[in-house]
Image (cartoon, rainbow, N blue to C red):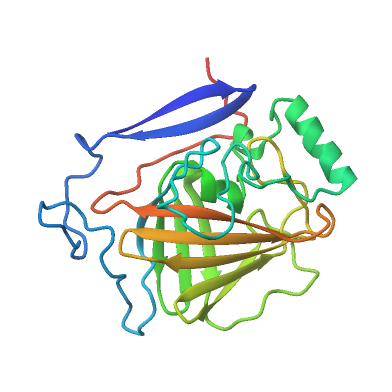
């Protein structure tokens, strides 16, 4: 059974997920064959599964790996590549910090001084793509040839990534919390570009800013049966002097399912 614990950290309300293998919301139901080691455990280093079209199959239930605090991600999870992002502070492992413009740095300082009270998640509003990547609750990827859907347990978020060759909407598109995402395959890497975001976004609990001028480019790479790396580049000329990139590591959760998580706007807890 999964139990949610709400804790205060610097005045911000966080949701921390704990999972126990002893109980489950659904009875155990076999999913597509899970490769196993000789002792019967899921073989995380087995080869990646592929679709009928020969593309890496990203489908499955995934969880973030060690994003809660700095310095927790072992070298074996990310031997090379960009710094690993954090949920509290997306830049926790970026040497020298982020290339913030003065006005963006001032906004971040204000948000931190206010203990993150205006973070959208604290008000049961959509938390944005980066916080979805780094928070601890699972997410399910459903992959078809023309569309990838990500169902997030946290706040029951839903995201669509179109892989049918369409172009992003025009510059006058109505801004969305999650923006408009289009993807393409480059060899075994899914490259996703997202634009058309709402202004005033939060990339983490501390309040690292994201504006409506931003483009997010994600590289999804399933490196083995049980592991996936997602590199996210933020190009936001209104908030940063140059683009910057972080990595999120994901781990498969075989034979498990999402549970219901309902958050009501302006809900109050006694």
Q: Quadrant of residue 218?
A: bottom right
The answer to whether residue 184 is above or below residue 177 is below
- x, y percentage for residue 37? 15, 57
- x, y percentage for residue 267? 57, 27
The answer to whether residue 221 is above or below residue 87 is below
- x, y percentage for residue 5? 43, 25
- x, y percentage for residue 48? 31, 70
Residue at left 35%, top 47%?
258
Task: Say left or right for 83 vs 141.
Answer: right
Nearer the observer, 81 or 166: 81
Task: Say left or right for 136 vs 169.
Answer: left
User: How many numbered discs?
Assistant: 0
Task: Say left or right for 99 vs 54.
Answer: right
Residue at left 45%, top 50%?
75
Which quadrant would the N terminus be assigned to in this image?
Answer: top left
Residue at left 60%, top 68%?
181
Task: Say left or right for 144 vs 195.
Answer: left
Nearer the observer, 149 or 112: 112
Residue at left 57%, top 40%?
87
As drawn, the residue found furthest toward the right would be 102
As drawn, the residue found furthest toward the top would be 270
């Amino acid at each position: 059974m999964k139990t949610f614990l709400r804790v205060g950290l610097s005045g911000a309300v966080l949701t921390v997920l704990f999972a126990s293998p002893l109980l489950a919301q659904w009875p155990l139901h076999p999913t597509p064959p899970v490769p196993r080691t000789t002792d019967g455990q899921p073989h995380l280093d087995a080869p990646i599964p592929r679709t009928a079209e020969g593309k890496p199959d990203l489908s499955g239930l995934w969880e973030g790996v060690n994003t809660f605090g700095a310095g927790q991600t072992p070298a074996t999870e990310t031997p090379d590549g960009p710094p690993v992002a954090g949920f509290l502070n997306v830049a926790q492992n970026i040497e020298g910090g982020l290339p913030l413009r003065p006005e963006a740095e001032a906004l971040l300082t204000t948000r931190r001084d206010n203990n993150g009270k205006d973070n959208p998640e604290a008000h049961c509003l959509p938390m944005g793509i980066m916080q979805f990547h780094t928070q601890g609750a699972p997410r399910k990827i459903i992959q078809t040839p023309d569309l990838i859907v990500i169902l997030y347990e946290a706040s029951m978020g839903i995201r669509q990534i179109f892989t049918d060759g369409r172009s992003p909407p025009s510059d006058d598109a109505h801004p969305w919390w999650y923006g408009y995402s289009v993807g393409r395959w480059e060899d075994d890497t899914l490259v996703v570009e997202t634009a058309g975001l709402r202004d005033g976004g939060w990339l983490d609990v501390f309040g690292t800013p994201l504006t409506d001028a931003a483009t997010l480019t994600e590289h999804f790479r399933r490196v083995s049966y049980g592991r996936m790396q997602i590199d996210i580049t933020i190009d936001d000329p209104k908030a940063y002097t140059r683009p910057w990139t972080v990595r999120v590591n994901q781990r498969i959760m075989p034979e498990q399912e999402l549970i219901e998580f309902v958050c009501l706007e302006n809900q109050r807890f006694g």
